[in-house]
Amino acid sequence: MSLSQSFRVQNFLPVIDQFVASLKHRLAAYELVCSRFGFLHELETLAPPDIQRAALNLVAVYNNDLDECLGNELVQFTEFMKMFKVKEKSDDVSIEQFMYQLIHLKCVKESFPNVEIALRFYLVLMITNCSAERSFSKLKLIKNRLRTSMSHDRLSNLAVMSIEHDILRELDFNDVIDEFASRKARKVSI
């Protein structure tokens, strides 16, 4: 077996297999989210019985957080939303984001509590995927081919520091340096 074939079998193909498996896993996760929350995007075109059915499926998944009256709230909220959609919705905001903003701008959170919770669940789900993407891009910046000898602990610590840079900027490094110096001091203080 030549060196190029050996590289292909030992390195390239396992990486491609892992990549394909990760894409399939991500696709399955997006299909699950779409099956649960996809009806929110089409509220205006769905008939009330279809909204009720989709809402019951969502309540079955989040039964500790949502009440069974979610379907009724969604039917009423759809009519409420139609009054403001033409005037207030901009093209750069998704319909779900617009609905969430509408609830808060018109102060109707108490009238549609389950709708607000369902929209919050949906809108927060996408952020969780972004944080994983950010951590991988940070790892790519931190561990490049020039730093391949870096230990795993140091790489992990640098990645956390890079991802949480806004918290890191608030730290007072004088205290950290003084504590490090006192721990590493070789002289015995008298």
Image (cartoon, rainbow, N blue to C red):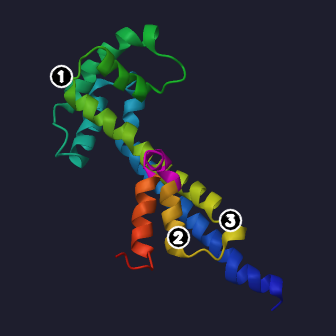
Label 3 sits on a secondary structure element that is loop
In-image side of 35 versus 49 (left or right): right
In space, the residues marked 3 and 2 are separated at their CA atoms by: 14 Å
Task: Name the mark on residue 171.
Answer: none
Of residues 132 and 114, the one nearer the viewer is 132
Give the residue displayed 56% in from the left and 76% down from the top.
151
In space, the residues marked 1 and 3 are separated at their CA atoms by: 51 Å
Image spot of residue 1 (x, y percent): 80, 92
Task: Provide the residue span drawn in magenta.
Answer: 162-172
Q: Give, as a three-letter code, the residue at label 3.
A: Asn
183 in the magenta segment: no
In space, the residues marked 1 and 2 are separated at their CA atoms by: 48 Å
Image spot of residue 168 (x, y percent): 46, 50
Of residues 69 and 116, the one nearer the viewer is 116
User: Which residue is tagged 3?
Assistant: 144
The residue mark sitting in front, 1 or 3, is 3
